[in-house]
Structures are given as C-alpha cells and as structure tokens.
C-alpha cells in the first residue's frame, strides 16, 4: 500500500498493510476540523465534520520521494503533530512523539485497487461527536467510549511493546523531535 499526496510528489510505502491496523476510524473533534480548514481542505471531512483515518505504525512507513515536501503543523504547542505536504496541501497523517500511532488520512492511501480500504470493513469507531454537525444517521461517541478504547488499545499496547514508534521517518533518532520544525497554525 502506498501513501501519497494528491499531486503524487510525496510518496511513502506502508509495509504490513492491513495486517497491523485496528481498522477504519473517524474523528469529529474540533481540532481535526480546524486542521482541514486551515489547509483549505474541507474536502477530506465527511458530511458531519469527521476525518477518517486508518492507523499504522510509524516504523512501518518508508518515504520514497518528496520528504522535503512534508510539513509538520500543530494547532497549539502541545497539540498533535499533523503532517501535510507543501506541494498540494494534502493532509497525510497525525502523530505524537514517541508514540506508536500514525493516523493516516483515508485520502492519502493509494492502491491499484480503488476498493482496497473496503477490505478493512465498516468504520470501527467514531469519536468526539460533541463537535460533529447534527443529524448523523450513525452513532458517534460524545468523546471516546469504552468500545473505542477496546478497538485501539491492543494496537497501541502491541506498538509500545514492539517499539513500533522507533525509526519513524517523521522524527529524529530521539523519536521526539519532528524532522520538520512544527508550525503553529
């Protein structure tokens, strides 16, 4: 599976997909919505303001081209590291330093098979519904429900145990310092 920006100048390879992912997840938090708005990319949100991500381990991502086009953004100095490209403003993924999580935007996944993400099945969790637009025909947890934790915790625990956050292409060797200095939006 490849990860790419819209114009194709940034390309990364994701190994072991879909083996290690907990599946399709959607976040409706105000920060995710604000990030899309700041990039002028509301097209990555669903009708209710949700951002669909499919998590992977940072260690399983190898950047093939365009690493110089990758920019790190934050909404505050303590916020998530949100990665997008400078060539076409494509949101790519969200990370945290020293943490085994790369929440890759569904729009960044590229495959010869246009239905490749469908193999993951239905969306397994919808969180932060308090910030979602009204009228959703499906259940969204107000914040993060217990069932949402049950979906992602095995992935995070396994990732911590196997050190899947190390050797990330998004952080220096200390696994804390982003390879691109974060810009506060």
Image (cartoon, grey):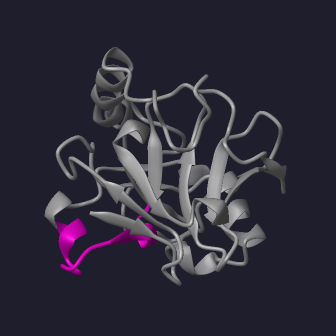
Quadrant holding the C terminus: bottom right
Is residue 132 shown above or below 174?
below
Q: What range is drawn magenta here? A: 105-118
- On the picture, is 185 further left or further right than 31? right
Magenta span has 7?
no
- Name which quarter of the figure residue 71 lies in: bottom right
- Name which quarter of the figure residue 78 lies in: top right
- The answer to which of 68 and 6 lies nearer the viewer is 68
Is residue 52 among what the camera can see? no
- The answer to which of 164 and 169 lies nearer the viewer is 169
Is residue 65 shown above or below 126?
below
Is residue 38 shown above or below 24?
below
Q: Residue at x 63, y 63 (%)?
A: 84
Which percent across, then down, holds residue 133?
Answer: 60, 68
Is residue 75 among what the camera can see? yes
- The answer to which of 99 and 37 lies nearer the viewer is 99
Which percent across, then down, holds residue 106?
Answer: 40, 66
Q: Outermost residue toward the top?
A: 161
- On the picture, is 121 further left or further right than 27? left
- On the picture, is 120 further left or further right than 125? left
Q: Residue at x 37, y 28 (%)?
A: 164
Is residue 121 shown above or below 61?
below
- The answer to which of 53 and 26 lies nearer the viewer is 53
Which percent across, then down, holds residue 60?
Answer: 34, 42
Magenta span has 110?
yes
Q: Residue at x 22, y 61 (%)?
A: 122
- On the picture, is 25 further left or further right than 28? left
Which percent across, then down, holds residue 63?
Answer: 45, 56
Quadrant holding the N terminus: bottom left
């Amino acid at each position: 599976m490849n990860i790419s920006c819209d114009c194709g100048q940034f390309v990364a390879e994701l190994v072991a997909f879909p083996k290690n992912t907990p599946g399709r997840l959607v976040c409706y938090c105000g920060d995710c919505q604000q990030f899309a708005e700041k990039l002028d990319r509301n097209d990555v949100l669903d009708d209710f303001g949700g951002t669909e991500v499919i998590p992977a381990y940072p260690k399983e991502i190898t950047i093939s081209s365009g690493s110089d086009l990758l920019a790190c953004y934050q909404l505050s100095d303590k916020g998530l590291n949100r990665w997008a490209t400078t060539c076409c403003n494509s949101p790519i993924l969200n990370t945290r330093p020293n943490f085994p999580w790369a929440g890759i935007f569904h729009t960044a996944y590229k495959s010869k098979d246009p239905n490749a993400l469908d193999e993951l099945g239905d969306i397994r969790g919808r969180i932060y519904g308090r910030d979602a637009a009204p009228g959703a025909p499906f259940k969204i947890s107000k914040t993060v429900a217990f069932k949402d934790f049950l979906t992602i915790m095995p992935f995070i625990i396994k990732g911590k145990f196997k050190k899947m956050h190390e050797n990330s292409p998004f952080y220096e060797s200390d696994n804390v310092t982003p390879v691109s200095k974060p810009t506060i939006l």
